[in-house]
Image: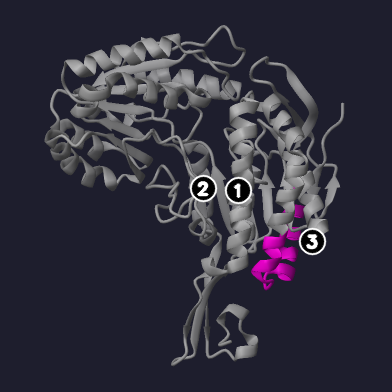
């Protein structure tokens, strides 16, 4: 059987690694396509040195050059759109339509185009000129960036095509991309497009490099290596914390997006005025894509009263009746079922689901759990652990003041939602809740589910630890996402002809 090549030092090469793996179709369980190598240190050493060598060539190039590359790459991806989407569907079981073809692939292209536009304008670099003291500064490229992609977005967050990749290139940095083992074939197709783009715009062929997988200890060793300047990662909290520790020890910037349960606080007016519609909205958001979104609403806090009890029954019935979809990997399924067991053993009531699904190869039943506020507050660390997938935990309160206490107990989150009306009671509760919740979430929403993350310069897809490793930056939203992979360079009394173009008087 064929073993795929890695892309190192500007060439498709046979990996030095001796271990291999294959992708699986989550819907059928069947093995898909070629074997893919697990790279060893020899592969990574080659990638590190090649990236460092390339950085010496490209570090002073203008933004136009990087914009040309991103635009050429976008065109190459468009030429192979059908093939890429089909492969992503095979490896992830995410539907071609409306997910991959109609939403995620166009989003991927939009991110790359937006990054190209920002690179060309140069405004992201925030040049500052103090003529009186002849001191000037701007953000510029930081050096080779290691981009590690997640399992749940094979296109829009892929290590070789997603938001971290686009931002790193727009800032002018060579990239070492690590695919996710859940969709290596998809990543290889996009890498082929990128190699064609590099040639088309006369870029060094080693500006981007690709490995499919690597042993964790070798990956952490690479992160600590002085030739890596920054790291971008999206994935689990366990892996993210280990990556952050390695980067922190080496004193380098690391941008990790980890776990989030995205609390939804429901105030009395919403249940009184639109209980059925809100049940539909919540169910649709929670079960979309089998719940495999980092902004999936995994925690719902309800007000006291009979309306809350009725709403729980509405949602339970909808969860039980909804079709079960495949999860991305067996590992995702096992982790979800383990998390559900931990919640039940900790005192949560299982309302529906909670077991592996029989009708799909890699799936869990749609799961809804409930716990009262007293239990939640007594062991908030347990009850706010992420159960990644088609699952959510409802917290029932006996007093409206418990909502602020629950918000106070939360770890950092990507998002936090409040559903309310203009009723005076709702507004009074909101005024007590919002200041507490605001400190714990990167994006605060009113009357809107969190699962949509728009490609907008105003978007913040970040938040306090442990949702991410740094609350001051976003993984989605240009230009802020670009500045993650840059350094602030200051020029003091440097003559005009030695300055970057953006800092010259002209």
Task: Give the image quarter of residue 504.
Answer: bottom right
Residue 42 sits inside the magenta stretch: yes
The disc, 2 or 1, on the residue closer to the chain's N-terminal end is: 1
Q: Which residues are magenta?
A: 39-68
Residue pictured at 47% horizontal, 13% vertical: 322
Q: What number is the disc on residue 110?
A: 1
Q: Contact, CB < 8 Å: mark 2 with mark 1?
A: yes
In the rendered image, residue 452, in percent from the top left (x then y), is placed at 46, 37
Where the C terminus falls, by quadrant?
bottom right
Does dot 2 land on a helix, a strand or a loop? loop
Seen in the image, is 197 located left or right of residue 324? right
Lower sequence index among marks 1 and 3: 1
Look at mark 3 in the image and give the residue it sits on: 201
Q: Earlier in the sequence, mark 3 or mark 2?
A: 3
Question: Looking at the image, which residue is at 20% across and 17% down?
Answer: 307
Q: Residue at x 14, y 30 (%)?
A: 400
Rendered image quadrant of residue 119: bottom right
Q: Which mark is residue 455?
A: 2
Q: Residue 124 appears at what percent x and percent y? A: 52, 65
Dot 2: within a 10 Å radius of its alpha carbon, few (fewer than 14), some, or many (20 or more) residues? some
Q: Majority secondary structure of the magenta segment?
A: helix
Regarding residue 147, the answer to whether it shows in the image is yes
3D distance between C-alphas at marks 1 and 3: 20 Å
Q: Is residue 17 left or right of residue 66?
A: right
Report the residue at 64% width, 17% height from top. Answer: 27
């Amino acid at each position: 059987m064929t073993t795929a090549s890695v892309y190192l030092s500007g060439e498709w090469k046979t990996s030095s690694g001796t271990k291999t793996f294959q992708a699986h179709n989550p819907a059928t369980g069947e093995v898909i396509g070629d074997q893919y190598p697990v790279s060893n240190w020899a592969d990574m050493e080659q990638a590190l040195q090649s990236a460092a060598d390339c950085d010496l060539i490209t570090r002073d190039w203008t933004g136009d050059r990087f914009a040309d590359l991103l635009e050429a790459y976008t065109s190459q991806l468009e030429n192979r759109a059908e093939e890429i989407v089909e492969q992503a569907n095979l490896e992830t079981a995410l539907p071609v339509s409306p997910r991959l073809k109609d939403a995620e692939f166009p989003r991927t292209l939009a991110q790359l185009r937006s990054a190209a536009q920002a690179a060309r304008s140069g405004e992201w670099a925030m040049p500052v000129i103090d003529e009186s003291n002849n001191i000037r500064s701007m953000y510029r490229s930081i050096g080779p960036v290691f981009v590690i992609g997640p399992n749940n977005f094979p296109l829009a967050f892929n290590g070789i095509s997603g938001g971290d990749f686009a931002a790193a290139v727009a800032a002018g940095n060579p990239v070492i991309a690590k695919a996710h083992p859940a969709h290596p074939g998809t990543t290889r197709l996009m890498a082929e497009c990128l190699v064609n783009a590099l040639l088309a715009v006369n870029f060094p062929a080693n500006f981007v490099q690709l490995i499919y997988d690597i042993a964790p200890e070798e990956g952490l060793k690479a992160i600590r290596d002085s030739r890596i300047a920054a790291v971008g990662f999206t994935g689990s909290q366990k892996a993210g914390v280990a990556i952050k520790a390695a980067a922190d020890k080496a004193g380098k910037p690391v941008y990790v997006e980890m776990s989030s349960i995205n609390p939804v606080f429901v105030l009395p007016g919403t249940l009184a005025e639109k209980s059925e519609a809100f049940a539909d909205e919540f169910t649709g958001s929670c079960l979309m894509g089998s719940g495999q979104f980092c902004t999936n609403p995994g925690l719902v806090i309800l007000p006291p009263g009979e309306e809350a009890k009725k709403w729980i029954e509405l949602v339970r019935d909808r969860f039980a009746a909804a079709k079960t979809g495949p999860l991305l990997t067996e590992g995702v399924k096992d982790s979800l079922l383990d998390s559900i067991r931990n919640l039940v053993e900790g005192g949560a009531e299982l309302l529906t689901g909670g077991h592996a699904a029989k009708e799909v190869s890699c799936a869990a039943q749609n799961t809804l759990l409930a716990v009262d506020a007293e239990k939640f507050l007594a062991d908030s660390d347990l009850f706010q652990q992420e159960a990644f997938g088609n699952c959510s935990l409802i917290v029932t309160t006996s007093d409206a003041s418990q909502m602020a206490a629950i918000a106070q107990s939360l770890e950092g989150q990507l998002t936090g939602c409040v559903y309310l009306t203009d009723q005076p009671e709702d507004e009074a509760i909101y005024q007590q809740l919002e200041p507490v919740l605001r400190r714990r979430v990167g994006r605060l929403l009113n009357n809107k589910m969190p699962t949509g993350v728009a490609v907008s310069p105003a978007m913040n897809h970040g938040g306090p630890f442990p949702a991410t490793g740094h609350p001051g930056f976003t993984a989605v939203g240009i230009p802020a996402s670009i500045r993650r992979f840059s350094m602030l360079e200051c020029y003091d009394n440097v003559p005009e002809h030695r300055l970057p173009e953006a800092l010259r008087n002209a």
